[in-house]
Image: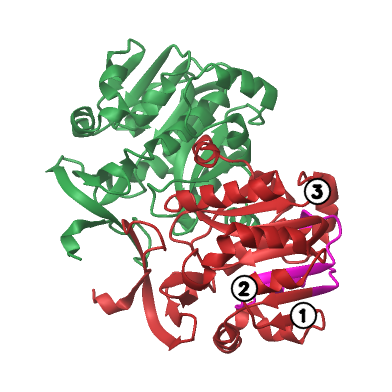
Chain colours: A green, B red
Amino acid sequence: MKRENWFFESPLPQTKFEVKVGFKLKRKIFSSKSPYQKIEIFDTFPLGRILVLDGILQLSQKYEFIYHEMIAHLALFSHPCPQNVLIIGGGDGGALREVLRHPIKEVFLAEIDKKVLEVSKKFLPFLKLKNSLRDKRTKVLFENGVQTVKNFKNFFDVIIVDSPDPAGAALPLFQKKFYQNCYLALRERGVFITQSGNFFQQISEIRMISKRLKEIFGEIEISHFFTPDYQGADFSLTIAGKEINLEIDLEELKKRTKKIKNLKYYSPQVHLASFVLPLLYQKIVSR
Amino acid sequence: MKRENWFFESPLPQTKFEVKVGFKLKRKIFSSKSPYQKIEIFDTFPLGRILVLDGILQLSQKYEFIYHEMIAHLALFSHPCPQNVLIIGGGDGGALREVLRHPIKEVFLAEIDKKVLEVSKKFLPFLKLKNSLRDKRTKVLFENGVQTVKNFKNFFDVIIVDSPDPAGAALPLFQKKFYQNCYLALRERGVFITQSGNFFQQISEIRMISKRLKEIFGEIEISHFFTPDYQGADFSLTIAGKEINLEIDLEELKKRTKKIKNLKYYSPQVHLASFVLPLLYQKIVSR
C-alpha cells in the first residue's frame, strides 16, 4: 500500500490532530495556489472527484448534494417567500445550483476567490456552475462577504454562509460583527444559515457560533446530518431568523417541496428530523 | 509522525478498502487471540479507551453510550411491556447495561466468546459488566446465538443482535434461517433489532438484511444515527416486530423514558427522528 495512493485530509482548523480520514486515490487532477488558498482536485474511488481547499475536503461528486440540498433548502423553505438571496462563499456553485431551483428573484454570490469558480467550471461539471452563471437571476461579486453585507440594508430574505472552517480568510465570517451586519442586511422575516462544523471535533466552534447568533437573532435552530464528505462526523448547520418563527408547517412544506423535482437527500420530514438534537448535542450547545 | 502512534481500522468485511479512519494512540493496553477472534484494547486521544475485534473498532469509552442506548432503548420502548429479553453477542456488556435499566424480568446474554467478557470486566469498567453480571435478572450463555434461538419458542419479548459485521463467526447471524428462528423464539408482539451496518460503505449489507427481515416479519423500520465509533459513517439498526405495530405514541414514550435516569443520547424525539430516512437512504433500501 503506497502512501501516495491515499488522500488524507489536513487537520481541521483549531482542532487537535487526533483523527485521520483517508480516501483511496485514483489520481490527482489539478493543483494550484490562488491568492487565498491552495486549490486541489483529485479523483478518488469512494467519493468520485473531490475539491480540496487548504487540505480540507469541501465536496465530492458522489455526495455533494447532501450538504448543498440541506444548506439551501433548509434556509429557503424556512422563509415564506424568498425573493432576494445572498450566498457568501460557495464559489463551487453547489449551493447556488440548489437556490436557483426556487422561484426567487435574484441571488448574489459573494466569493472572494475567483479561482474557485474557474476550477469548478472546468473540473466539477456536476455542480452545474456554467448553467447557474448563465441564469439571469445570478449576480456574482468577487469580494469578501464581510464587505458585501455592509453594503446592503434590509435587503435580503435569505443569507447563506457556505464558507470553509473558521481559519484564514474565512475567520471574519464567524465573528460577531459580521453576524450583526447580516442581521441588518436581512429584511424582516429574513433567514440566516451558516455551516457550523461537526459535533465530534468542532464542539467549541458550534458552541461559539450558536452563542454569538443567539445574542443577535434571539432564537436559533441547529440542524445535523451525516455526509461522507466531512471528516466522518455528524455535521451541523445553524439557522436563525430575523423576527420570524422558524417553526415549519409540515403540510405547507410538503406542497412547496413538490415543486422541486429530483431531490436526492432533502425532504420535509428530513428537514424537521434534522433539528432533533440528541441529548449529547443539546448538552454541547447549552453549555 | 510515527506510524505506530495511530490506530487504523481494518477494512470492514465485504467492502472495498477505499476509506481509512485513524485515531491517534496513547498506548496499547492489551492484545490476545481467542478461539474466535483477535481482541485488542487501546487508549486513544480522541475516543479514550477502545475495544477492537479482528481490527474493527467495536466501542469507545467516550461514545459507546450512543450505540448502546440506541440499540437497547429503541427495541425495549417499541414493546409495550418487555419482560424476557435476549441479547446475542454484546459480550462487552454495553447493551446489557442499558437493558437492565428497564423493569424487565430477565435477560439472557448469548455470547460465544468468553474472552470478550473477561477483557471487558478487566479493561472497560465504564461498561459496568461486573455490576450487570451480579444482577439476578442476568443469565449468561456461552454459546452461539444461532443455537440459542433454536432452543426457545414463543419466549422472548425482545431479541437484540449486537454482533460484529457479517463475516467469520458472525456470518450466520445475518442469515435467513437465523431470522426465522428469531421470529419463532419471539412471543406475540415481540420486537427484533439488529445492527445493520453503515449507509456509506455497507449498502449491500443493509439491503440484504432489510430484504430478509421483510420476508419473515413483514414490515421493518430502519433507524440511523451517527457515532464516532463506527468508521465515520451514518450507522443503521434494523427493527422488526412480530404481530406488533412499531409506531410509537410520543406521549406514552415520554412517560416511560422519564423513568430511566441520566440518558446521554437517546430521547423519545431522537427515537422518532432516527427513523426518518433521507431520500438517498430510502432509495438504497427500496432497490
The number of numbered discs placed on residues in the rendered structure image is 3
The span from disc 3 to disc 1 (Cα, nearest Å) is: 26 Å
| Kind of element beneath mark 3 | loop
On the image, which quarter does residue A163 sit in? top left
* Secondary-structure class at tag 2: loop
Q: Is A279 positioned to the left or the right of B139 in the image?
A: left
Q: Is residue B198 above or below residue B124?
A: above
Q: CA distance from mark 3 to mark 2?
A: 25 Å
Q: Amino acid at mark 1?
A: Thr
Q: Nearer the viewer, mark 3 or mark 2?
A: 3
In magenta stretch: residue A157: no
> Viewed as shown, does residue A262 lie left or right of B272?
left
Residue B150 shown left or right of residue B66 in the figure: right
Tag 3: amino acid: Ile
- Which residue carries the number 1 mark? B138
Evaluate whether label 3 is on the same chain as label 1.
Answer: yes
Circle 2 sits on which residue? B90
Point out the stretch of residues depicted in magenta. B77-106
Q: Quadrant of residue B275?
A: top right
The answer to which quarter of the image holds residue B17 is bottom left
